[in-house]
Image (cartoon, rainbow, N blue to C red):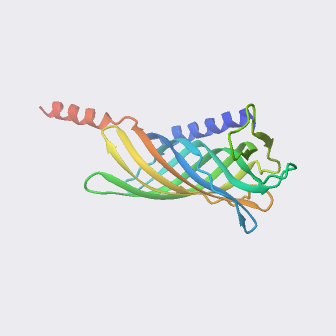
Amino acid sequence: MKNKSCVWLVCVLLSIAAMGKAQVVTLENGFSITSMRHSKEGLGKVYPYQMALGMQYMDKGWYNLSSSIGYMRRGSRDKIFYNPITGENGYVTMKNKLHYLTVSTTFDIKKTSHDGYTFFIGVGPRLDFNLKSVTVTYIDFDQSRPEGYEPTKENLDGIHPVLFGLKCVGGIRKDIGNMQLGFNIAYLPSFTHLSKGVHDRTFTFGLSLGYKLGGNKGDVKTIRTVRHHK
């Protein structure tokens, strides 16, 4: 994916923030559980790192909108038995690594408990832009790896450049002053296949740290009103 496209996506997200008057800006870090399937055959799961910068806006009490832009990786791990020319048996491990820039907006329904915890669920559209796709192949040696040995890397061809799907998310968050702590779980179904006959199954788990914008304005207004009546 070209760098210009990434810049445009960031500009679009910032424009949405300005229009929606973002109330909370968040940074999420975590991991995903992802695998690839070809027809009915499934490949091994991998657990890559994922992160996202997001915002919550248009808060109406029982709902709000959330938009985010982030990085995530899909892929799979497959161990193949082989018999090399030497006649010795062994295994080859193949890892598919698909890197994506992901953009999403969800409509979140929420409920706040008496002790200040907010529970929410949400769903909305998602676009994933493929940045790079490679297959890494290395031999599992029975003994120590030979000096100078390097795994082989090859570009993974036939990957669709853009995935369109949904983000189905749920979680809990807690406001502490102007800060917000949260935990999110999301399921990312895709309507677009990764490539011909290949699709993925991906879940993400993340801890988020948020900051409320203009959190003290209400307090200042209250203080001024009290002084005026005095």
Q: The N terminus appears in which quarter of the rendering? A: top right
The spot of residue 157 in percent (x, y) is 82, 48
Q: Is residue 131 above or below residue 108?
A: above
Q: Residue at x 75, y 39 (%)?
A: 151
Q: Nearer the viewer, residue 185 or 26?
A: 185
Q: Tell me the residue at 49%/58% (across/down).
A: 122
Q: Is residue 200 above or below residue 156?
A: below
- In this view, the residue in front, 96 or 193, is 96
From this viewpoint, which residue is outermost toward the bottom?
40
Viewer-closest of 118 and 75: 75
Q: Residue at x 77, y 51 (%)?
A: 160
Q: Nearer the viewer, residue 212 or 188?
A: 188
In the image, farthest residue toward the left: 230
206 above or below 187? Answer: above
Quadrant of the rendering where the C terminus is positioned: top left
Number of numbered labels in the structure image: 0
Left or right for 189, reference 78: left
Residue 23 showing in the rendered view: no
The x, y position of residue 159, in whole percent, is: 78, 50
Kindly give the residue lying farthest to the right in the view shown: 85
Residue 169 spot, x, y in % from top left: 50, 57
